[in-house]
Image (cartoon, rainbow, N blue to C red):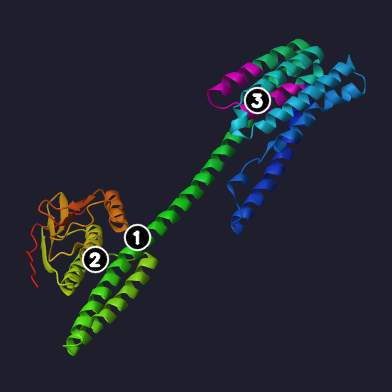
Amino acid sequence: MPVKSFWQRRTRHLAHWKTSGRAQLTEMRAKEKSGRSRPEDLGPPNGFAMLPWLLMGMGSFSNVLQGKTGNPWLGGLGLLVFNSLYINVVFRAFSKKAREARATKYALLALTAVTFALAIGYGGSWLMFFPLLGLATGSVLRGKQLAPAGIALSIAAAVVGGLRDGWDAAGIAYGTFLSTMVTAAILALSETVKELRTTREELARTAVERERLRFSRDLHDLLGHTLSVIVVKAEATRRLAPRDLDAALGQVADIESVGRQALTEIREAVTGYREGSLATELDRARDLLDAAGIESFVRQSGPPLAPETAALFGWVVRESATNVVRHSKATRCEIEVAGTAERTRLLITDDGRGVGSGSPGSGLKGLTERLATAGGSLESGPGPHGGFRVTAELPVTEPGLDSALTLEEHTP
């Protein structure tokens, strides 16, 4: 076949593929705008995109029908076998598992043998099956196998074309190499884009799950602490009401204040902007322990804490104080914050019965994960002299002032 005719036919097919690609791109953008785009919408969804290239063999089919080919029955059988193998190979190429299967490689080898047999036996328009073989090869092979296979196939096409049709078939070798490499590049790019889209959606799902986990932890800590305060103050109100109405009304006012504050904190937690304050949590823990009849000692020393460190320690103080009131049966609780130039430590101990020395509850588990994410640690368990102890440590993330905070101690 003349080189000019070959390139005219190839140009028409490239124009058809380009028009089809633009239509697919327009549809994909419309789906993205409407929110219906999925990873499988990207790139050729299946082997149908490779079928129009079979029109390159129409010249050979026409020769068989017109009887211009020797042994037309043999040529027709060769066309049928080639088309069947080509369709089988390109449809399997769009599934990674099927593409890497041995059956696909054997089908590609059989397609190669049929292509060489038809090209050597007939020449002329039958040499157009080499670019089709290049398309199938580029669809299946990836990585290091691709370049050697493409070069070898192109050289073989040049040799066979030169022996059959001389210089008129010089473009067959170039067309074969181009078909192999461009097809492989386009399909590999399509698969990469699809994987990136899938990864992006997975990251979005992970972010949603993390936000749900954050909200559930915040809600657990907020409600657990608040309900404990309300229960303790309600019990105090019940005890005080028969003998001291004014004190009981004071406790009721505190319950109302705690409830209003809890509503505010829950709203802040829902919007994701809540930042805990260590000083505020220390004051609340002190009030909660006092209301429960537990002697409290709060000490703080070292350089000022970074906002992130103070927020995390505030959550630890809140959860630990709630656990002391709920479970420990303690009469004394000490909270100490001590910082150095490298790390800051929060230590909470009580003289209770050591409940919680087993597996930590969901509150302490969540706090352990939070501190670990920030490069710190949280340990909880029985104290060396009885009771229960919680130790939290975090690295210093911002340089503090050289002057230490004044020691603060409170005894009810």
Q: Does the image show residue 1?
A: no
The outermost residue toward the right is: 66
**Is 73 one of the magenta-colored residues?**
no
Mark 1 residue type: Arg
Which residue is painted at 30% across and 71% down in the image?
Answer: 227
User: What residue is disc 3 on?
Assistant: 104
Mark 2 residue element: helix
Question: Is tag 1's residue or tag 3's residue first in the polypeptide sequence?
Answer: 3
Label 3: few (<14), some or many (≥20) within 10 Å?
Answer: many
Mark 2 residue type: Arg
Query: Which of the two residues, 185 or 4, is positioned nearer the viewer here?
Result: 185
Judged by depth in the image, the label closer to the viewer, 1 or 3, is 1
Mark 1 and mark 2 in contact? Answer it, CB < 8 Å: no
- Residue 208 placement: quadrant: bottom left
x, y percent for residue 229: 25, 73
Mark 1 residue element: helix
Q: Is residue 111 above or below residue 275?
A: above
Question: Is tag 2's residue or tag 3's residue first in the polypeptide sequence?
Answer: 3
Does residue 98 appear to the left or right of 391 in the view shown? right
Label 2: few (<14), some or many (≥20) within 10 Å?
Answer: some
**Is 147 one of the magenta-colored residues?**
yes
x, y percent for residue 240: 18, 84
Query: What is the magenta range?
Result: 128-153
Question: Is tag 1's residue or tag 2's residue first in the polypeptide sequence?
Answer: 1
User: What residue is disc 2 on?
Assistant: 326
